[in-house]
Image: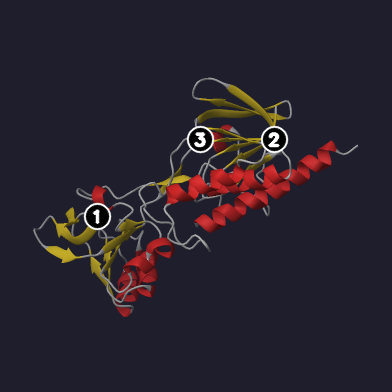
Amino acid sequence: MYDVTIIGGGPAGLSAALLLGRCMRKVIVFDSGEYRNAWSDAMHAFITRDGINPRDFIKEARQDLEKYDFEFKAKEIVSARCAGGFFEVTDSEDQVYLSRKLLLATGIQDRWPQIPGCEPFNGKSIHHCPYCDGWEHKNTALGAYGKNRDAIGLSLSLKTWSSDVTLYTDGTRRLRAADTQLLERNKVKICTAPIERLEGEGSKLQRVVFKNNGSMACDAIFFSTGQDQRATLGRQLNCDFTSKGVIKTYHQQQTNVSGLYVAGDAARDMQLVIVAAAEGTKAGVMINKELQEEFRM
């Protein structure tokens, strides 16, 4: 029996494990090895760690945990349920684990643009978040990719990092007159032509090639194509979800299920690494407080 099971070995899960370890709680962390930033070579906007390789960040975080009562399993959890006031989770090898509290830090997965030739550029010059990677492409030709009206807001946001921004709708033409006027006023170029492929050198994107044989110079693309929960555990546990498809959490990462917390990108807050880590710490504090109250006479 563990005090806390943490599912997810990224910044949120490991930050929670660190705090709970320091509270002398018996903790087990499960990590499937699948990370949202697996394509990336650098992690940004995390104070003292700006530019660190994400894999090095995880390695150092695990090293921080070694002196605490912490167990790590490189396994995927495939099912979870609440039974008799405890949480029961089952891994991919049908091993069952019990705990008093459960933290989901399973994250989300992006729907990467399905454009021929994009693979070498993913995480290098194709990104989902300008706050994370916009500075590295400042003052270059930037693209906002999204079908229909999905990337209007993203294209306007990219003007923070460059005056040369193009909205690519890849063959869809559902912009409203007001949309077009707003984009034109802010000097965002609009390209609705269907995209044939992306071209560049190594991991550096250089141009977008259209099916009509034309092309446009482009140094980096940021996309708005949607995302999904990486795991189905929240639904298995009957969590409430928001209209955006993330698990609904309250002030200190609690869910509607007693004893169940969610931190990181799977929850509703800003999707930044440093925020995920902070949410993990917040969840850890509240979990420990719950355990303190339950053990009092």
Q: Is residue 250 left or right of residue 204?
A: right
Point out the residue furthest to the top here. Answer: 94
Neighbor class of circle 1 (other Cα within 10 Å; few <14, some 14-19, many 20+) is: some
Q: Which residue sits at x=62%, y=28%? A: 81
166 lies above or below 202: below
Neighbor class of circle 2 (other Cα within 10 Å; few <14, some 14-19, many 20+) is: some
How far apart are the two marked residues, 2 and 3, measured between alpha carbons?
Answer: 25 Å
Name the element at disc 1.
loop
Q: Determine which of the numbered discs, if any, sits on residue 105 in the image.
A: none
Name the element at disc 3.
loop
Amino acid at circle 1: Ser
Q: Determine which of the numbered discs, if any, sits on residue 26 in the image.
A: 2
Q: Exactly how many numbered labels are in the figure?
A: 3
Earlier in the chain: of badge 1 and badge 2, it is 2
Residue assigned mark 1:
203
Q: Is residue 163 left or right of residue 70?
A: left
> x, y (%) of residue 28?
62, 34
Earlier in the chain: of badge 3 and badge 1, it is 1
> x, y (%) of residue 179?
34, 70
Query: Residue 200's image quarter?
Result: bottom left
Amino acid at circle 3: Thr
Earlier in the chain: of badge 2 and badge 3, it is 2
> x, y (%) of residue 219?
24, 64
Amino acid at circle 2: Lys
14 lies above or below 139: above
79 lies above or below 34: above
Residue toward you, 124 or 62: 62
Residue assigned mark 3:
232
Residue toward you, 269 or 44: 44
Q: Is residue 256 visible?
A: yes
Query: Residue 290's image quarter?
Result: top right
